[in-house]
Every structure is written in C-alpha cells, then in structure tokens.
Image (cartoon, grey):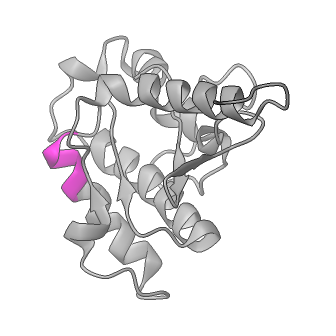
Amino acid sequence: MKGFGAGIVNDGELIGYQGSPEIGHIYPERHPDDQTFKGTCPYQGDCLEGLVAEPAFEARFGKSYKEISMFEPIWDIVAYYIAQSAIQATLLMRPQKIILGGDIVNEVELQKIKQQFQKLLNNYVEVGPIDDYLVAPSNSSRKLSIVGNLSLAKKEFYSASDVTMD
C-alpha cells in the first residue's frame, strides 16, 4: 500500500465529483506510544497516510511492512489509526458497511481494527454486528482502486452535457 484512500458508494453511485475522497489525509489522534514519528506524507507529514502507508513502515523500520511480524506493537498502533478513520467515516456518512482493503489489512489486522473501533466508538452509534460492518473485500484488494477509477471515469463520461445515448 503506497497510500490510503477511500471510495464511497451510495445507491450504486460513486460519490466524489472532484475526485475520490481523501480520507488518508485526515489527522488521527496520535497513539500514546507513537508520539515522535514525524510521518512520511509529503503534504501533511503525520496524517493517516503518513502514519500507516507503506512508506511509513520503511521510514520507521528500514524495511517493508511485509517483513514485520503481526505480533509487533506497531500493528496495534496502525489498527488504532485505521479504526479512527472508520469511526470518522461512520459518524460523517453513516454507511451500511465499511470495506477495509489494501495490503496491510489481513485477517489479523482486521480483528485488531475491529477491537479498536469498538473501544473508541464506545457504542456512541449503532452499527450492527461488527463482523458485518467492518469487512475485508471479496475481490482482490489490488483491483479496488482500478474499479474506483473506472467508476469515476464512467460517471464523468455519462454526466457530460454533450454525450447522448441512443
């Protein structure tokens, strides 16, 4: 994962008329055990993307996230940050479900994110069963951004004023 993005679908339509939502550039509350890392985002530094995307792992440890055991404390910190983004999406958009994809969200990390989500949300709003609300994609996560980009292109093409369909 080089970045951190989002796609929002409502009634079968992708939302985002000026591009995709940039949830990766929100500022999560810093984890108590992660106060000094400056982040790697060239624009905001310690935004969500700057704290959890692949370049952040390389900057923190000098190696890929793929080489770091799921038992290392960094994965709890990453779950804390991703859970905060899921909470912000929940409170802002009230989605039916949130699909968490990408290379770093394997089954172990997804469970950590769910635990952090429940702890941080603290039953403020009802989201239903957590295993139905925060889920992994059914398709290959590598294809999700391609599908989103194609959906935006289709939306732009069919919404253009000079296009008519016979």
Residue in front for this viewpoint, 24 or 139: 139
- Check residue 94 for magenta coloring: no
> Residue 59, how many percent across, how many down?
47, 17
Residue in front for this viewpoint, 93 or 31: 93
Compared to residue 99, the image places residue 25 above or below, namely above
Residue 69, quarter of picture: top left
> Residue 12, how many percent across, how many down?
49, 53
Which is the main secondary structure of the residues drawn in magenta?
Answer: helix
> Residue 139, how many percent across, how many down?
23, 35
Residue 114, quarter of picture: bottom left
Q: Is residue 39 visible?
A: no
Taking the spot 67% from the left edge, 32% from the top edge, the residue there is 158
As drawn, the residue found furthest toward the front would be 166
Taking the spot 60% from the left edge, 67% from the top edge, the residue there is 93
Magenta region: which residues?
106-111
Taking the spot 38% from the left edge, 64% from the top edge, the residue there is 97
Residue in front for this viewpoint, 121 or 160: 160
Compared to residue 95, the image places residue 109 above or below, namely above
- Check residue 110 for magenta coloring: yes
On the rendered structure, is 69 left or right of 16?
left
> Residue 46, how many percent across, how many down?
64, 36
On the rendered structure, is 33 left or right of 130?
right
Residue in front for this viewpoint, 88 or 58: 88
Residue 142, quarter of picture: top left
Q: Is residue 84 visible?
A: yes
As drawn, the residue found furthest toward the top would be 62
